[in-house]
């Protein structure tokens, strides 16, 4: 079996694949001070709860945007499974072109999102990934898979937390979908501002991206990431939600890099 890790700044998403099938997945807090032994214990416990064991793991792959976590987690994976994880980055030999000015700076999550979108949809695509940051990955497929750049904006929860942190009288608020734009209570005002504000920003940026698209093809727009299910229903431009897109991209990358499981 294959273990795939999407290491984010807030959460690490783990997927367990049997062949091409996603057997199980779970989320762990991306805790910078967690030791390799603690990561190994957490992984072993999650596998056990899923009805599997570390002995079933034949390969591991990771994409990380949190270097302060990567080393300890990598050592923990190896300690738990005896498999050294393969890391995806801008140098990886993958079937795509990073058609940007600084390809080595492209986030590993954006690389594997590109792989997944190209294989699953086989169309020009804008992937909107709702995480600590909200990223827009622009992908073309005519003449080969190309990542042509995109947009990075503050994530939904990042914006909400920073708003509360920097203001003395605004309370921490549960981010549930607002029913109207004009809030009658402070919490409702915050929900409307954060959620509708994010949704309208996404719709506006998608329209701007489509206006600059390098061909006459109209790209489809798909959402992924931990907060996609909360924001996507509020957006007009997002056509579908694929919560496991990044994990699928890691599985595709693992196959392309010759891993066997």
Image (cartoon, rainbow, N blue to C red):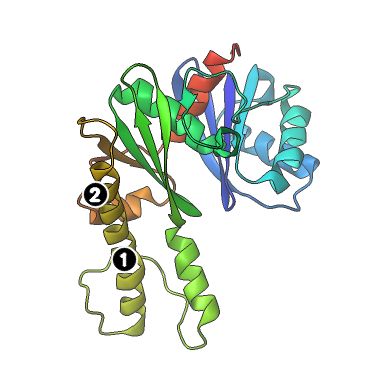
Q: In the figure, residue 126 lies in which quadrant?
A: top left
User: Which x, y percent locates residue 60?
Assistant: 64, 24
Q: Are marks 2 and 1 in contact (CB under 8 Å)?
A: no
**Does residue 23 appear in this view?**
no
Q: Which residue is mark 2?
A: 207
> Looking at the image, which residue is at 68% across and 41% down?
42
Q: Secondary structure at mark 1?
A: helix
Note whether 79 is above or below 67 in the view shown. Answer: above
User: Which x, y percent locates residue 213?
Assistant: 28, 37
Viewer-closest of 20 and 66: 66
Give the foreground label among 2 and 1.
Answer: 2
Viewer-closest of 107 and 245: 107
Q: In the figure, residue 43 lies in which quadrant?
A: top right
Q: Which residue is mark 1?
A: 197
User: Which x, y percent locates residue 247?
Assistant: 48, 31
Note whether 100 is above or below 178 in the view shown. Answer: above
Within 10 Å of disc 1 (Cα), the crowding (few <14, some 14-19, many 20+) is some
Residue at mark 2 to residue at mark 1: CA–CA distance: 15 Å
Q: Earlier in the sequence, mark 2 or mark 1?
A: 1
Count of numbered badges drawn on the protein: 2
């Amino acid at each position: 079996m294959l273990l795939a890790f999407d290491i984010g700044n807030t959460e690490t998403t783990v997927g367990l694949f049997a062949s091409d099938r996603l057997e199980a997945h779970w989320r762990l807090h991306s805790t910078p001070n967690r030791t390799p032994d603690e990561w190994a214990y957490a992984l072993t416990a999650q596998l056990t709860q899923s009805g599997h064991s570390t002995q079933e793991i034949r390969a591991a792959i990771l994409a990380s945007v949190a270097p302060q976590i990567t080393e300890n987690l990598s050592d923990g994976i190896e300690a738990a499974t005896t498999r050294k994880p393969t890391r995806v980055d801008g140098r990886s030999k993958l079937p795509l072109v990073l058609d940007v000015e600084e390809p080595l700076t492209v986030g590993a999550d954006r690389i594997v999102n590109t792989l997944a979108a190209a294989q699953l949809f086989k169309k020009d695509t804008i992937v909107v990934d709702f995480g600590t940051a909200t990223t827009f990955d622009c992908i073309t497929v005519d003449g080969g898979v190309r990542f042509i750049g995109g947009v990075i904006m503050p994530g939904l929860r990042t914006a909400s937390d920073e708003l509360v942190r920097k203001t003395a009288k605004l309370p921490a608020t549960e981010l549930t979908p607002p029913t109207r734009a004009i809030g009658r209570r402070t919490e409702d005002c915050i929900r409307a501002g954060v959620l509708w504000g994010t949704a309208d920003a996404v719709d506006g940026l998608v329209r701007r991206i489509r206006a600059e698209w390098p061909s006459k093809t109209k790209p489809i727009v798909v959402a992924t990431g931990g907060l996609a299910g909360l924001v996507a229903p509020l957006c007009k431009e997002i056509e579908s939600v694929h919560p496991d897109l990044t994990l699928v991209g890691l599985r595709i990358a693992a196959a392309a890099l010759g891993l066997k499981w």
